[in-house]
Amino acid sequence: MNILQVHNLSKRFDGIQAVNELSFNVKKGAVTALIGPNGSGKTVSFNVITGFYRPTTGSVRFNDRDITHLSPNKIFHLGMGRTFQAIRLFPQMTVLENVMLGLEYNSGETLLAALLRSPSLIQQEKENTEKAMELLKTVGLEEKFDDRAENLSHGQRRLLEIARTLGTDSDFYLFDEPTAGVFPNTIPKLMSIIADLKTRGKTILFIEHNMKVVMDISDHIVVLNHGSKIAEGTPTEIRNNPVVLEAYMGKGRKIAS
Amino acid sequence: MAYLLHILIIAGIYIILTLSLNLIIGYTGLPALGHIAFACIGAYSSGILALNFGISPWIGLIVGACAASFFGFVIAFPSIRLKGDYLALATFGFGVIVYSISKNWIDLTRGPMGLPGIPKFSFFSYELQPVWAYLIFVLVFIVFTTFIINRVVDSPFGRVLRSIREDEVASLSIGKNVNRYKITVFVIGAFFAGIAGSLYAHYITFIDPSSFTVMESIAVLLMVVFGGMGSIKGSFVGALTLVILPEMLRFLGMPSSVAAPLRQMIYGGLLVLLMLKRPQGIIGDYRFR
Amino acid sequence: MVVGGIYSLVALSFAIIYKTIRFFHFAHGSVIVAGAYIAYSLSCFVGIPLLLSIVVSSLITTVLGIVIYKTTYSYLRVIGSSNLILAITSFGIFIFIQNLFQILYGAQILSLKTGPVSEGHLIMGGTITNVQISIIVISCLLLVLIRSVVVETRIGKAIRAVADDPLGASISGINPERIIIYSFGIGSALAGLSGGLISLESSIEPTMGLNLILKGIIASIIGGLGSIPGAVLGGFFLGIVENLGIWKIQAGWKDTISFAVLIAFLLFRPEGILGKRTDRENL
C-alpha cells in the first residue's frame, strides 16, 4: 500500500515555480530516493510534505489521510520524522539533550509535569536518558554525550541528527541528503542504519546526490528536474533512462555498480 | 538604614520582574519588549480594587497577577506567529498601549494624577508598616518565584523551551507544539510581573503611569541581558547591580537633572557594549547570536 | 496632513537604510533628534542662516549615521548576530545619544519656529502655514527624487541589488559594505533634514526621537517594508488615521491608535500596502 501520496503538488515562490504539478507515491516499507539536479525542487517538496511550506496547489496524503494543511508538529505525531539538508540541531545544548528531545514523553513535557515533578516523571527521565545513550551508541557518539552539539564535527553532527530522528520511532522517515559532507567512511554506517530501518518495517524517502548510495539501497527512484517529475522507476530503469542522463549532463557520471 | 532597606525592596521587586522576563526572553528566546505593561496591570488592578472596592491587598495581588496573565495570553495568542523583529515591535506596541490607557482612561485610573493612598498588606490586623517587615515579605515572594521558575526550566518542559530558543524549526520537526509553549511562557512571565506590580503598589502606596513607561521595560530588559539571558542567578545579579549601582551615583552629588539622563546614558552604553562584547551577560552561558 | 508629511520624511529616511540592512535601526530616531539640535545650535549660537543650518546639520548627521554603522552594526553583522541583538544594540545607541542631548541641552523645549504661528492659508476648513506646506511639498519632492535615484542611478540600482540578494550582488562586483554605507549616509542625511524641518514646525525636546522613529517604523510597515514609496504612503496614511482618530477621541490616545493600527497590520497584512507576500521560512 502507499503510505504517502503526493498529488499534483505545486509550489510557487514569488515568481519562481519551485515545484510543478508533482505526483508520486511512496510504497509502505520501501526505500525510495528522490533525486535530481540542484534546484529541481527536492527539498521544497520535502518541506511541503512535512508541513513547513503550504503548497500553492495539490495535496499530500499520509496513510490515506489528507495532511496538506497540517502543521509540522501535527504531521510528526502522525508518524513522519525528518532530517534537514543543513542539519538542524540544538547547537548550545548537549548531545544527550538533543537526542532526548526526540524521545517520547507522554505528558512529561508539560508545565504541570514540570511543576509537580512527580516520581513517575523522574523515572521516565531516567529511562529516556538510558534510551538516548543507547541511540548514541548506535551512531558511535556515546563518548560525546555531554559535549555541546556545536562542538561536533560535521560528520558527527549528521550522525547526531540521525540519532535524534531514530529516537522518534517514526513510521516514515524523510532524510534530506544524509550523506552530504560526511567522510566517506561514515557512509556505510548510514547505509546500514537505513537498511536496518527497512527490516524493521519502516518506510524511507530520501534525497541524495551520491549516486552510488542511491543505486545500492533504493527500491524505487523518483527523478525531478526544474520542479517536475521526469522519470520514475527501479534503479536499473533509471540508470539507463536517457531523459535522466540528459538532465544530469555535465554534472558527473553515474556509477554503474 | 531605612534607605538601604528601601533600595533592597525595590531591587527585590525588580528581581521578580527580571526572573519573569528572563523566562520569556532568556530561556525561550522570544523578544518581548514592553514587559512592564504586565506589572502595570497588576499594580493598577490591585490598587483600584483596594481603593474603590475596599478589597484586601491579598486578593488584589492574586487578581492582579491573574489579570496580567490573562492579558499575557491575549497579546501572545495572535502575536507568537510573528517573526522576531515583528514580535518585538508588537509586544512593544502593547506596552505603549497599556501605558497610554493608564494615562488617558481617567475614569478608571485617574490618569497622570495616579492612585494615592493604596493600603499596605496586613497579616490579620498587623499592618506591614515597618520597612524591614516588607523586605522579608518581598523575600518570601522572591523565594516563591525562584522556586517556580526553577521547576519550570529545569524539567523536560524547560528543555523544550530551550530547543525553541535554539532552533524553532527543528523543534517543530520533532513534534513540539511550539506555539503552545510560547503562549504558556508569556502567561507565566506575565503572572509574576503582575505580582511584582502589586507588591510595588502596596509598598509605595502611590502609583501613576510614569512608573510603567517604555524606559522601565528597557531597564528590566537590561537587567536580563546584563545578568545573563537564560540564567536564574544572572537575573539576581542583573537586577541587584542595576538597581544598586545607580543609587551610588546619587552620592556623587550630581544635580538630578543630570543624574537621571546620565543614568540612562549609562544604561544605553552598557547595552551596546554588552551586545558587542558579551551578549551572554555576566553569568549567562547561552550565547545569543 | 502635516503630521503625515513629517512621518513620511522620517519613514523615507528609515526605509532607505532598512532596505539594505534589514533590521530596525532604532538609533535612527536619535539621529533625527541630533539633526534638530545641531540645526538649532548652528542657527542660534553660531548665527548661521536657518536654511543653511539645516543643510549643514544634515551633513553632520550623515557622518553620525555612518559612524554608528561602522562602530557597531558592521562588526555585529560580520560575526553573524541575529536581528534581535542588532535591535537591542540599536536601542542602546538610541538611549545613549538621546540622553546625551538631554544632558547637553537640558530638558526644556526649544524651538526654531520663525515668527508667530499666525497666518496661514485657509484650505478645506483648516489653516495651513507656509512651513507646513513646505514640509508636505518637500516630502513629496524627496520621494520623487529618491525614487528616481533608486531606479535610475547606478548607486540606486546597487542598493536594490544588495537589498534583494547581497551574495549575488557581491558576486557581480558590487561591494555590499560600501553600498550599506551609502544607504546609511543618504538615510541619515535625510534624517538630519527631517529633524531640521520638524523643528521648524514643532518644538525640539530630547524625547522626541522615540516617538518619531516608532511612527517612522510603523509607517514603513504599513506601506510595506523595503518599499520606498510605501514608506511615504504609510507616513501620510498614518498621519491621517491618527488625526481622524483624535477627532473623535481625546488627543492623548494618539499613540494607542498608531500602535493599534500597527498591530492590525502585523496580524493581517504584514507585508504592508505595497509589499509582496513571501514565504519566510528558509529551510
Image (tube, rainbow, N blue to C red):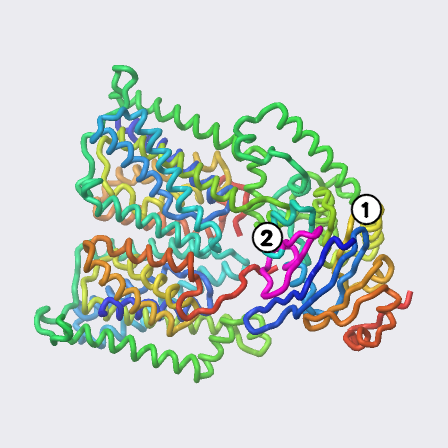
* x and y, in percent, of residue B27 in the image: 51, 41
- Badge 2: residue crowd in 10 Å (few <14, some 14–19, many ≥20): some
Residue A160 at least partly seen: yes
Determine whether B18 is above or below C221 in the image.
above
Tell me the residue at 33%/64% (across/down): C216
Looking at the rendered image, the quarter that the C terminus of chain A falls into is bottom right
Left or right of A15: which side holds A64? right
Which of these two is toward me, A233 or B270?
A233
* x and y, in percent, of residue C217 in the image: 36, 62
Task: Give the residue furthest to the right.
Answer: A257
Disc 1 target residue: A201
Disc 2 target residue: A70
Q: Give me the chain letter of mark 2.
A: A
Q: Which residues are magenta?
A: A48-67
Amino acid type assigned to the residue bearing label 1 in the image? Gly
Left or right of B253: which side holds C178? right
Which of these two is toward me, B162 or A29?
A29
Between the C-alphas of marks 1 and 2, the distance is 25 Å
Q: Secondary structure at mark 1?
A: loop
Magenta run includes residue B251: no
Q: Give me the chain letter of mark 1.
A: A
Which of these two is toward me, A187 or B157?
B157
User: Could you say which disc has been placed on residue B80 in the image?
Assistant: none
Amino acid type assigned to the residue bearing label 2 in the image? Leu
Magenta run includes residue A61: yes
User: Where on the picture, by quarter, is residue B135?
Assistant: top left
Left or right of B38: which side holds B237? right
